[in-house]
Image (tube, helix red, strand yellow):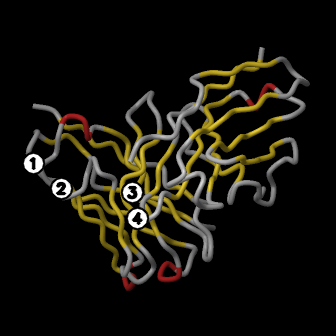
Amino acid sequence: QSALTQPASVSGSPGQSITISCTGTSSDVGSYKLVSWYQQHPGKTPKVMIYEDIKRPSGISNRFSGSKSGNTASLTISGLQAEDEADYYCCSYAGSSVVIFGGGTKLTVL
Amino acid sequence: EVQLVESGGGLVQPGRSLRLSCAASGINFEDYAMHWVRQIPGKGLEWVSGISWNSGTIGYADSVKGRFTISRDNAKNSLYLQMNSLRIEDTAFYYCAKVPYGHYFFDYWGQGTLVTVSS
């Protein structure tokens, strides 16, 4: 049960697009369409932004999109806004009723 | 309105035990799988354990397997985490989280309860 690999930090200017990667293995990310992404602002609880690799919950801006290729999932945020500055975590089912998170990525909006 | 309220956290010595509870309201609790996720203050999220709606399927992170036990009481709309042989590295905020029916992600989270393991 190794954590999924995410970059520690990414940054972008307002209006730009950024992508956060999440690399796992063929036993987790690559085996199931069950990657989810969470946004967490300081002092707040996590909020799901993407589920089942590419689906967006109702109420989540279409500026957020998910994709996956092989063992790597990605979260793309387009049209960056100041309010997007937060920590982002990927999460995947890993079989045998086990779930794993990524280490988290701090997004800074310059 | 869905509410998940954790309780039971506190300061405990290494090697001792603690039992966390999560009280659910605003949902038909027995329909949903539930999980525990923890977060060391200032650090990342770590999945701890999950339990299916009928307690038939349970999973644990390697870091807690054999020490923690997840359970639920659907009649009381409550989720539990029995934590034994606590270690300093178990210090964290513990969140309960709900999984929507037919899916595998966390759509609602409690506010968390802080467990501090220290001598």
Gap in Å between the C-alphas at discs 1 and 2?
Answer: 11 Å
Identify the residue at horizontal 33%, vertical 39% (top origin): B92
- The residue labelled by disc 2 is B67
> Which numbered disc covers residue B6?
3
| Residue A67 at x, y percent in the picture | 76, 47
Mark 3 crowdedness (10 Å alpha carbons): few <14, some 14-19, many ≥20: many
Q: Nearer the viewer, mark 2 or mark 3?
A: 2
| Residue B91 at x, y percent in the picture | 27, 37
Q: Earlier in the sequence, mark 1 or mark 3?
A: 3
Vertical order, B26 against B31 (above or below): above
Q: Nearer the viewer, mark 1 or mark 3?
A: 1
Q: Earlier in the sequence, mark 1 or mark 4?
A: 1
Gap in Å between the C-alphas at discs 1 and 4?
Answer: 22 Å
Mark 1 secondary-structure assignment: loop
Which chain is mark 2 on?
Answer: B
Identify the residue at horizontal 65%, vertical 41% (top origin): A39
Q: Earlier in the sequence, mark 2 or mark 3?
A: 3
In the figure, is residue B92 to the left or right of A109?
left
Q: Earlier in the sequence, mark 4 or mark 3?
A: 3
In the figure, is residue A79 to the left or right of A94?
right
- Looking at the picture, which amino acid does disc 1 mark? Arg
> Which numbered disc covers residue A33?
none
